[in-house]
Image: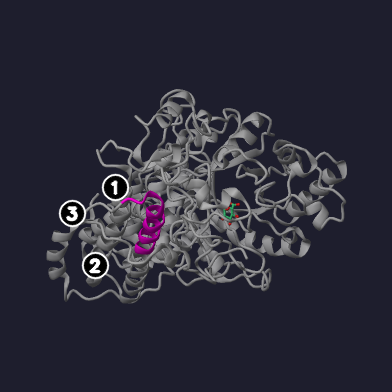
Amino acid sequence: MRVERFMSGLALILLALVGAGVAHAEDGYALWLRYRPVGQTWDARYTAAATQLVPAGGSATITAATSELNRGLRGMLGAVPGQAASVSRDGAILYGTPANSRVIAALDLPLKGLGNDGFVIRSVRVNGHRATVIAANSDVGVLYGVFRFLERMETREPLAGVDVRDAPKLKLRMLNHWDNLDRHVERGYAGLSLWDWFTLPEWKAPRYTDYARANASIGINGTVLNNVNANPDILRPRFLKKVAALADVFRPYGIHVYLSANFGAPVAIGGLKTADPLDPKVQAWWKAKADEIYRLIPDFGGFLVKANSEGQPGPQDYHRTHAQGANMLAAALKPHGGIVIWRAFVYSAQNSEDRAKQAYSEFKPLDGKFADNVMVQVKNGPIDFQPREPFHPLFGAMPHTPLMMEVEITKEYLGFNTHLAYLGTMWAEVLDTDTWQHGQGTTVARVLEDGKGTGLTGMAGVSNIGNDRDWTGSEFDQANWYAFGRLAWNPQGSAEAIARDWTKMTWGENPQMVDAIVGMMMESREAVVNYMTPLGLAHQMATGHHHGPGPWVHNLSRPEWNPVYYNRADANGIGFDRSATGSDAIAQYAPHVAALFGSLNTVPDKDLLWFHHVPWTYRMRSGQTLWDSLIDHYDKGVATVAQMQRTWALLKPYIDKQRFDEETAFMEIQHHDALWWRNASIAYFQSLSKLPLPAGHAEPPHDLRYYEAIKTPYAPGQAE
Ligand code: GCV
């Protein structure tokens, strides 16, 4: 969708809207659950469909559903309908399970096959009255149905004749918080951690409930509370009580709590001399720890583990495999129904193999060797959450192991909170890609939907949530939290449809405004790719904090932490040869995919420099030289941001001042940063290629030294 398309129409519509009244100031706290008044067009219709609430059952989850209906209907219709024990008038909303309501049971709704979390929303007749029934096999399913019902109202969908039947395609839909016990959030750009460990467990801040509401509204059902670079102290009794308090708040909303476990905990806090997974004392320690946790939190989800990666301890410290480590923890959790999520994000400075190959090399031989309550969590791409990566080869290579895909909602490599980058398109791109594992059609989404006989399927998102008033550090980053939940519920969902729903709920229903915002969102991630790392480049970010460009950096202690490792640029050309003549990373993909990526004739332009080293003068399929095309992409990225700024400026009359002003300022920052990226990258690559810029493209205003000297002290989100 092109942003320009909306521009001319917008200008006209704006004229009509001026004078219609400016929306009142908002601070973003309400997220997409704003429940703003529906206005004249919908008022009568919705009011007629919401005259009475008839809950079935009295669980905390049904109580939460009732309070959400009250909140939503009060906001949208201005009044709360009365509550009744049975349907006694037209327009009742009846919600519950067949087990708790004979009326719902008698309706004989198609609940079979919907599992615990699916639901049906349907217009029915009960006791001779028109009613809407929201039914499920469990109370949590009912709650999801209630949120979907309210979302229909927020997005102004008709309620009359409604007939929705839906269930999540993945079982685990999980946030991973990289929150430390001192409340610093690694790669967090929205303030401190939400978890106030110091005042827990006594003070359960109301915000914890709002966090649970927001997650439940998009189907998220698990949360890992602490950083994968895990402080073992989280497993001490003092902290477990605090964890239990949070679990109590989240339980009615169907959210299970998980913890990142430090593999070295038996030594660090257990007084043992070893953490060797085959040592019976170590096994007994973890078993006792699991028992202790489940006494406090009966529905505890399990452990997430980062082992033997970036300095974290792990089984390899004792010459054991990742599978031996994972299975030992899995045995401790198994009697309680808990699971282990073991991360495949491993690479080593001592290993000279192409970093993109190392996780596959480590894990592929372990396929089929994990216990049936272990999932392997694989990042979307083989390196590390870059603006664009090809899909991780493990998705096509572990036919016997349930895989969870990990994406980074927080924008460590995409400009932090101030760059507008809608990540729904990025994740959908990966999910829709065909691994060819079992022939054509084995997309990453389908791989995730296959529990390999264990029933375990899932997707995890590294949270972008902090204690900023707007939760995520910017309005548009809320969209990424929302999109993550929606895609984890349905990995085959449409990024554009999700952006549209979010936009209507977050900014308002005016169709032209919605089109304009959705247009911006749909182009935004590609803009970031273009001004940061076009044509398959990756990891060109400055050292440590990853803010701003550093394509020249070559002196870090670990080779694979240096941007030059990835761009391999020299006087002759640029790009990482991962073809058969290079690192042969393509061989980790199915033959069809390997052939596609491995040949210069077929590799998509967007992945060119990821898989190939080519001369600066290489002829692209477009007829341009690579050099000219590279410059074009940088400029296109900057131009798209400038276009987004113009579109946004036109939206001023539609949007409340606080949110409008903030985004205006953030876009200024983004434009400045995009230019910085463009100029610094061109200055560096030109120092090697010695080629002139193509006609019509401006020289960088400063020399390379100027860009190399730029520092960003105290950038947020850095570990140290
Ligand atoms: C939690 C990247 C990030 C690290 C992060 C790591 C991981 O390397 O820069 O901050 O550590 O990924 O996913 O474990």
User: Does label 1 or label 3 sit earlier along the sequence?
Assistant: 3
Whether label 2 lies within 8 Å of ligand 1 gets the answer no
- Please provide percent x and percent y for residue 590: 48, 26
Q: Is residue 39 above or below residue 567?
A: below
Which one is nearer the viewer's eye here, 500 or 570?
570
- Please provide percent x and percent y for residue 635: 29, 56
Name the residue located 50 percent from the left edge and 58 percent from the top edge: 412
Q: Nearer the viewer, mark 1 or mark 3?
A: 1
Please check the rendered image and state whether residue 47 is part of the magenta-colored stretch, yes or no: no
Characterize the local packing of mark 2: few (<14), some (14-19) or many (20 or more) Cα atoms within 10 angstroms: some
Q: Amino acid at mark 1?
A: Asp
384 vs 626, left or right, is right
Q: Is residue 285 above or below residue 644?
A: above
Q: What kind of secondary structure does the magenta stretch mostly adopt?
A: helix
Q: Secondary structure at mark 1?
A: helix
What residue does disc 3 label? 5
Which one is nearer the viewer's eye here, 470 or 624?
624
Find the magenta span and give its range.
675-691
Q: Amino acid at mark 3?
A: Arg
Please check the rendered image and state whether residue 685 is part of the magenta-colored stretch, yes or no: yes
Characterize the local packing of mark 3: few (<14), some (14-19) or many (20 or more) Cα atoms within 10 angstroms: few
Image quadrant in which the C terminus is located: bottom right
What residue does disc 2 label? 651
4 vs 529, left or right, is left
Q: Confirm whether residue 94 shows in the render.
A: no
- Please provide percent x and percent y for residue 169: 47, 39
User: Does label 2 or label 1 sit earlier along the sequence?
Assistant: 1
Which one is nearer the viewer's eye here, 345 or 84?
345
What residue does disc 1 label? 628
Measured Cα–Cα span from mark 2 to mark 1: 35 Å
